[in-house]
């Protein structure tokens, strides 16, 4: 009689971890214009608050993967959440830009564990088909909640300034820490424990199909983060969108992805991976055309820019919910390491992409749209090779 409630509470705890990992970014970005004024920052220095967070995340996650495979998921998550809490405290009471940078770095270091290992808890608890269903549901719930984050972040900034958003992150971090401590089970550890060295990652890097999957996923996430990372400066500074209304533009994208993921979770098992990926490919072509067209026209209409990017959000629903579980199960004994490498590549690539977008940003969507279009083209090309790879298709059957 106790098993069902504990399973439900475990899923709620996983949702909280995913929610924290998602809104750690989206709740914070509406504060960009105020932070730029408060600390007298250039656009590149504002974007550095994202990049340093990604760097801390990346440095942490390679250790997180190996440590979690050796010592278990729960203790590493608890250490990560404690580090995130310390970083949130530093950000909340930051009196100078370097202190804010250090706090954001610690937030990145700490959030890596719950962000990576929350999905590993699902992978440890269910077979592949159920993993895909639950991950689609979790993606849907998380992104629907994340859709609210920019709206909430905008109003928090409006009434409580930039410190209010960091206080909200601190409170949620402490709540998640308590939930993990109470409701996350201690999974059975492997009998053979690998040494904590980089050699444990070599089988992953040497697997060409796995690297192909990861490359496609990394390319797939870059356009979204470029758009979200640059939109506060573009919409509020250049296009005149108010702080109160900015969250609706950004939140709409996450809401579409979230609701789409929930709906897709109920139909995904009816079709084979190659059929679904072919459909995603057609949506990618549509998104490439719409983004490139708006970039070419150099539109200054925030609604038109948002609508032009919307097809890309829809096109992400299928591959993000089907390919990620395939990655985690490619080498079952190294799930945490696979998740770490995937997140590491994604964040390094995203950080570099954001800096590239920040460098070429000139107050309009044109240059941002051109960069996003190039990455969408890279997604289309890499997905073509994913569909043609027999080993990947065999694992999905």
Image (spheres, helix red, strand yellow):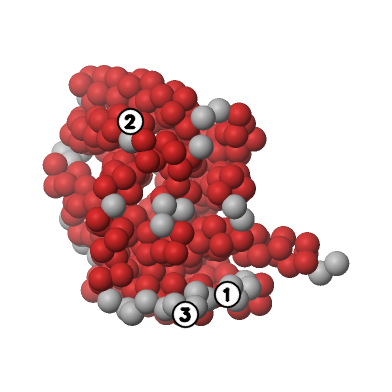
* Disc number placed over residue 290 in the picture, else none: none
Front residue of 245/199: it is 199
Report which residue position mark 2 lands on. 388
x and y percent of residue 155 in the render?
51, 52
x and y percent of residue 157 in the render?
45, 57
The answer to whether one can see residue 218 in this image is: no
Which quarter of the figure has residue 343? bottom left
At x 33%, y 30%, the residue is 388
Left or right, 4 with reference to 76: right
- Mark 2 / mark 1, whichever is N-terminal: 1
x and y percent of residue 298 in the render?
22, 24
Up-down relation of residue 256 to residue 179 (above or below): above
- Mark 3 / mark 1, whichever is N-terminal: 3
Report which residue position mark 3 lands on. 71
Element type where label 1 sits in the image: loop
Element type where label 3 sits in the image: helix
* Disc number placed over residue 188 in the picture, else none: 1
Up-down relation of residue 239 to residue 109 (above or below): above
Q: Are marks 3 and 1 in contact (CB under 8 Å)?
A: no
Mark in front: 3 vs 2 = 2
What distance separates the C-alpha of mark 2 from that of mark 1? 36 Å
At x 30%, y 70%, the residue is 200
- Near mark 1 (Cα within 10 A), the count class, few <14, some 14-19 or many ≥20, is few
Name the outermost residue toward the left: 360
Name the outermost residue toward the right: 1
């Amino acid at each position: 009689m106790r098993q069902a409630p504990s399973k439900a509470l475990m899923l709620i705890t996983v949702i909280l971890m995913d929610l924290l990992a998602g809104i750690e970014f989206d709740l914070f970005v509406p504060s960009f214009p105020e932070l730029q004024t408060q600390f007298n920052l250039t656009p590149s220095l504002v974007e550095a608050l994202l990049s340093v967070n990604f760097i801390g995340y990346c440095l942490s996650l390679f250790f997180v993967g190996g440590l979690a495979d050796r010592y278990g998921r729960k203790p590493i998550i608890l250490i990560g959440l404690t580090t995130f809490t310390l970083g949130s405290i530093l950000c909340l009471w930051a009196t100078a830009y370097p202190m804010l940078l250090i706090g954001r770095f610690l937030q990145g270091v700490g959030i890596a564990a719950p962000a990576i290992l929350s999905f590993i808890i699902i992978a440890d608890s269910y077979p592949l088909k159920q993993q895909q269903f639950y991950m689609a549901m979790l993606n849907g719930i998380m992104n629907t909640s994340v859709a609210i984050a920019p709206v909430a972040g905008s109003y928090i900034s409006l009434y409580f300034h930039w410190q209010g958003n960091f206080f909200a992150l601190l409170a949620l971090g402490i709540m998640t820490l308590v939930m993990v401590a109470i409701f996350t089970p201690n999974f059975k550890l492997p009998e053979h424990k690998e040494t904590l060295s980089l050699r444990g990652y070599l089988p992953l890097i040497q697997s060409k199909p796995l690297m192909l999957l990861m490359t496609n996923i990394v390319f797939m996430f870059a356009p979204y983060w470029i758009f979200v990372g640059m939109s506060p400066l573009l919409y509020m500074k250049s296009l005149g969108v108010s702080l109160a209304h900015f969250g609706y533009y950004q939140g709409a994208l996450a809401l579409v992805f979230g609701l789409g993921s929930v709906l897709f979770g109920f139909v995904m098992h009816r079709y084979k991976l190659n059929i679904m990926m072919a459909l995603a490919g057609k949506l990618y072509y549509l998104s490439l055309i719409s983004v490139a067209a708006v970039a070419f026209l150099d539109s200054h209409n925030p609604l038109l820019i948002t609508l032009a990017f919307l097809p890309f959000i829809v096109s992400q629903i299928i591959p993000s919910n089907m390919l990620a579980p395939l990655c985690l199960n490619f080498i079952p004994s190294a799930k945490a390491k696979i998740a770490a490498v995937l997140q590491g590549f994604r964040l390094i690539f995203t950080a570099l992409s954001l800096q590239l977008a920040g460098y070429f940003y000139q107050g309009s969507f044109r240059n941002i749209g051109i960069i996003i279009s190039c990455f969408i083209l890279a997604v289309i090309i890499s997905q073509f090779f994913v569909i043609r790879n027999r080993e990947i298709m065999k694992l999905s059957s």
